[in-house]
Image: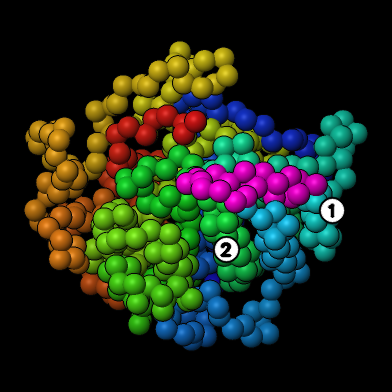
């Protein structure tokens, strides 16, 4: 097994000044700086590290159905979870049990039951002792330095509390999900997790910690009807989450020989077809085995009507013919463009000593792009950091599949912009047909390999210039375009 790029671990022989994470992103220019910061580099490195671990390797034993690492997989002695992973999983269960102590208030509410604040307050009171117990077996130094009097636990706690949603706005979105990834990244940087070349520890983090966290969040959303934070509506991938689509598509991708060699196309043997997301029976069967289908299943739980109608972007992606590895590659690009490059999503992400608000010396300053140029500027923000006026939509933010010569849709029309493309397939419904394009990252002049071909090239972030890509070093080249022009403002 070849060496793999991992998030660096702090040297335990050196002292470290911990900081209480604080807000740094206040306008679009700050988003550009963030994309060239040490924090961005570390976040993407950790995300790639977790993603690579979800690809089935040749040394893995056969598993059920999808041929990948199922959610409810059985583990042999060599697959036992480390103590910190078991304790983090138990922590998620404890947090879920607290919901019973804060039942939702009666009364009709479409979004935001105020009892969520009661649950949140209970968590704030108990979390310090819960973290002490959770991290007791980990190789993490919690003591403060006299110079700062801030402990590692205080820094970790800020990210964990930020991962449950906003008690003030009664909402939850991908920015809160990012905070949980940062929480796990902090533990990794402090040496709390075991480092292995096989990716077994990272795989356990995803399946035994991230998946229970997503289960907790979905229960919070259903119990307290939390509003989607920064949602793009039908233009967004998902109202609340993104990472299960990354990890879940990796689970269904072809077998790899080394974690460094990530396939660009193909699917695992016996993997469900991408188009199965539009079939309720297939989703119900596969959601117990795969994170992607589990996330789709939650959409079926909370939304009614044809899948292509309420989730057109996911339906669009389901038409990719080059397999789950192609979808995984596109999800990584889309995460960079739709989560990390969006002011409404990352504006509340805090920075401390572990995820630092500093320029990465190995990355040049990122110039404004279509993803940051239309974000709020200092002149458009009031004293509190809220926009005083809606910025004008930028020309470069229209959907990548929209013809440049096509006139804008009429104000009274009901057809979606992607209905202008007549090359694509029809949605599986007896309703009037609404064509759908292929996924944005599938628009290529080369012929796509057939699913299951397992064509292996370098990792997606290491590809040559000329295609949308990103790298663990934080650099971006020719990023994907944004599927919506007017998502420039914070939700509130």
Q: Residue at image x 14%, y 55%?
A: 435
Residue 161 in the image, given as x and y percentages of width and height: 68, 46
Image disc number at residue 158:
none
Q: Is 174 left or right of 179, judged from the image as shown?
A: left
The percent position of residue 246, horizontal first and vertical second, equals 44, 59
Give the residue at mark 2: 215
Asked whether 106 or 201 is in front, the reply is 106
Vertical placement of residue 458 versus 400, above or below:
below
Tally the numbered discs.
2
Magenta stretch, residue numbers:
105-125
Disc 2 crowd, CA 10 A, few/some/many (<14, 14-19, 20+): some
- Image coordinates of residue 72 in percent, x first then y, are 55, 78
Q: Is residue 150 left or right of residue 178?
A: right
Q: Which mark is residue 129?
A: 1
Tell me the residue at 88%/45% (across/down).
Answer: 143
Q: How is the image coloured?
A: rainbow
User: Percent position (x, y) of residue 48?
Assistant: 50, 56
Can the viewer see residue 454? no
Quarter of the figure with the N terminus: bottom right
């Amino acid at each position: 097994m070849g060496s793999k790029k991992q998030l660096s671990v702090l040297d335990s022989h050196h002292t470290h000044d911990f900081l209480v994470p604080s807000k740094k992103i206040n306008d679009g220019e700050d988003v550009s700086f963030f994309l060239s910061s040490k924090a961005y580099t570390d976040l993407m490195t950790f995300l790639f590290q977790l993603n690579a671990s979800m690809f089935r390797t040749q040394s893995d034993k056969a598993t059920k159905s999808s041929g990948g690492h199922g959610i409810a997989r059985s583990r042999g002695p060599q697959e036992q979870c480390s103590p910190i992973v078991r304790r983090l999983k138990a922590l998620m269960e404890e947090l879920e049990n607290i919901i019973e102590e804060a039942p939702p208030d009666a009364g009709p509410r479409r979004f935001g039951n105020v009892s969520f604040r009661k649950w949140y307050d209970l968590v704030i009171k108990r979390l310090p002792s819960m973290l002490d117990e959770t991290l007791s077996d980990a190789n993490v130094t919690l003591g403060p330095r006299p110079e700062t009097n801030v402990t590692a636990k205080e820094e970790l706690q800020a990210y964990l509390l930020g991962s449950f949603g906003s008690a003030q706005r009664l909402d939850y979105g991908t920015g809160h999900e990012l905070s949980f990834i940062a929480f796990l990244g902090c533990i990794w940087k402090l040496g709390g997790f075991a480092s292995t070349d096989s990716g077994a520890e990272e795989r356990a983090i995803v399946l035994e910690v991230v998946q229970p966290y997503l289960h907790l969040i979905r229960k919070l959303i259903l119990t307290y009807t939390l509003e989607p934070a920064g949602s793009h509506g039908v233009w967004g991938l998902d109202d609340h989450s993104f990472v299960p689509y990354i990890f879940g598509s990796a689970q269904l991708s072809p077998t790899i020989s080394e974690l460094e060699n990530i396939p660009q196309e193909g699917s695992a043997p016996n993997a469900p077809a991408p188009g199965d997301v539009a079939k309720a029976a297939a989703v119900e069967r596969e959601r117990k085995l795969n994170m992607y289908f589990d996330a789709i299943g939650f959409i079926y739980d909370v939304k009614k009507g044809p899948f292509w109608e309420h989730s057109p972007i996911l339906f669009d992606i389901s038409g990719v013919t080059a397999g789950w590895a192609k979808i995984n590659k596109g999800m990584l690009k889309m995460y960079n463009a739709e989560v990390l490059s969006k002011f409404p999503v990352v504006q509340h992400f805090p920075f401390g000593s572990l995820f630092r608000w500093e320029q990465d010396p190995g990355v040049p300053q990122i110039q404004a792009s279509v993803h940051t140029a239309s974000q709020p500027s200092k002149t458009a923000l009031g004293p509190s950091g809220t926009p005083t006026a809606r910025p004008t939509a930028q020309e470069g933010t229209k959907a990548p599949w929209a013809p440049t010569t096509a006139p804008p849709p009429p104000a009274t029309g009901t057809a979606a912009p992607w209905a202008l493309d007549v090359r694509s397939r029809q949605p599986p419904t007896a309703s009037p047909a609404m064509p759908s394009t292929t996924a944005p990252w599938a628009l290529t002049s080369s012929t796509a390999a057939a699913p299951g071909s397992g064509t292996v090239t370098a990792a997606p972030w290491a590809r040559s210039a000329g295609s949308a890509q990103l790298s663990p070093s934080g650099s971006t080249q020719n990023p994907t375009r944004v599927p919506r022009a007017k998502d420039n403002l914070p939700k509130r």
